[in-house]
Image (cartoon, grey):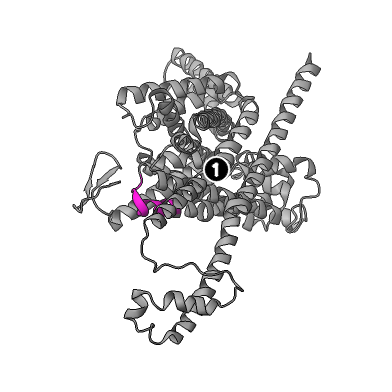
Amino acid sequence: SRVGSRGAPPRCKMSTVVWVVEGPPSTEIIRRALYSAVVTLTLGVLGSTILPVPWAFANLGILPGVAVMAMVAFVNDCTCCMLVRASAITGKFGYEQLAEHVGGHRAKVLAQVSLILLLYGTLCGGLAFLADVSRIMILKGAQPEAAWLDTAGTTGVAGMSDEGHFASAALGDSTATAGSWGEDLLALMRRDGRPVMLVVVATILYPLCLQRHIRQFERAATVGVVVVVVLMSLIISKAVSEGFPAIASGELPLWGFHKGGGAKLPEAFAVLGFAFYMQPMLMPLLAEMPHGESGRRVSETSVHIVLYGVACAAYGTVGVFGAALFGDATESNIMVNDLLPGRPMATLALYMSLVCYLCFGMVTTHYALRASIEVLLVGPGVPLDSIRRTITTTCILLMSLAVACTFPTAAEKIFAVTGCTAVCLVCYVLPVYIHLKLRSMQRQAQKAAEQTAYSRCSEPELFILPAPGAAGVSQQLHATTAHTPLARSQGFAEQPELLQPLLAEAVQEELGSSCSSWVSEQVDAWVLPMFIILVGVGCSVAGLYVGAMDILASWQKSGGAQ
């Protein structure tokens, strides 16, 4: 919503979710904006990241996993709030515009390159992951259909011909051919998930990506949240019904690190380290939120709710219960584990809903990528017409599909190095840099304003407190303040002793507030930024190590095969 200076009643555009409001936004608009932001950011944060979280907990242990998860959530919450406040102060709603505002053209280019690299890599990896999930869906959920096709193509047709109640042998031959063709198609989809992935992209992902505003994904995001809740409920009920087998057997430690998971700790740390980032999806959303102080508050509230109330709850629940259920057998994709044994139709329905959920998550990634490309090509603030939106969306998906289809198993490895580097810059380094530069600019502006105000002050009523311990402090204070016009009007000139307790209290409050503000300023200026950078660099180093080891193993395997 957009807030003007006139106090007219709110006006809403019913064709989109972007409201044009003149005057302070109403409570209903704030609530709607909060709900829309929460469900949209939830889908952007969770995405496919929720599926490897149980594997990370299984290799870290329960308490270390929870500790790492809470630390990463706190750091991402801090950087998201830094961006929200910087956007509210500067009026810039794009990552690139913010970077340029505080750091010039070089910072803008760095932000653009990092954003496009991160989002394009994420989209390619998401499509490759979608193909893998589609393959597993057919492999686990389409077995009864394959048996039916086999029966209909052979014995079933022969039996009908023997009884003489059905079609001729020619019809039986055509049915057998159709059954054989269907079985061959199922066999292909069990080996390769790309055909199903292409169908899903054309029918679900592409129409959603053509939407103009990110908050138009509200309904799809709500469906995605429901899918996550169903998955959480399934894992919880199964773990409880089986009595937490991995914890009961001692395979999964509660308080310490997993004894046999030392070699997998970097990858487990990287999984949780990149599970909470939503900064690229947050920035385009800010342009569609209410402006002003109310918009800042609702944006920060949505960030807190999503990171602490949704992401931590979802990751913690799926991670702890999933690891407690499967232990060392937990796969890097929890859906590879048998969640519904002996129930192929239910498995097929679960996987179909999960495929839709993955598409919904990629929509937010695509929207952020499209926004960055639009800024790069035509600049910020240029209206996005339907023709350019269609062309840009089509080109992005085709380029991403080209990578995912060409390297269906190596896409995640290819973008591991670039993704880790870009995540570190976009989610940790650049927000801290923007925050510190804005602080410095604000201090300089405040200092200049104070100097201007002091130079214009002609009344000798303002005084400077003498240094602590100086001789005659109380006498100086009395002499300075007791004869100001305000003091004379209150009767303090005739009875200066009345000022003593007031002055003592004022001095104590000033000293106390100065001390607390100094500590707060040091934490805000040094401790918190350094902690954020440390966590971000640690996550990136762990991810780079895992990516390098995967690439090295692939090279060694290909060399051994030759």
Residue lying at 63% horizontally and 44% vertically, measured from the top left = 533
Residue 59 falls inside the magenta stretch: no
* Residue 146 x/y as whole percent: 55, 28
Residue at horizontal 63 percent and vertical 34 percent from the top: 420
Relative horizontal placement of residue 274, taking residue 29 as reference (left or right): right
Which residue position holds label 1?
Answer: 277
Question: In the rendering, at what x and y percent does residue 256 appear?
Answer: 76, 56
**Does 291 appear in magenta?**
yes
Q: Residue at x 38, y 82 (%)?
A: 493
Please tell me which residue is depicted at 29% across the width and 56% down the height of the picture: 28
Image height of 187 relative to 518, above or below = above
Tag 1: amino acid? Tyr
- Residue 91: x, y in percent? 38, 43
The answer to which of 301 and 340 lies nearer the viewer is: 301
Q: Main secondary structure of the magenta part?
A: helix
For residue 338, say whether it is visible.
Answer: no
- Find the magenta span and give its range: 289-300
Element assignment for label 1: loop
Q: Position of residue 215 (x, y in %)?
A: 37, 42
Q: Is residue 441 left or right of residue 143?
A: left
Q: Does 32 appear above or below 427?
A: below
Number of numbered labels in the structure image: 1
Res 543 quadrant in image: top right
Q: Is residue 189 visible?
A: yes
Q: Which residue is situated farthest in the left direction here? A: 8
- Mark 1 burial class by Cα count in 10 Å: few <14, some 14-19, many 20+: many
User: Which corner quadrant holds the C terminus?
Assistant: top right
- In the rendered view, does 90 fall on the left or right side of 408? left
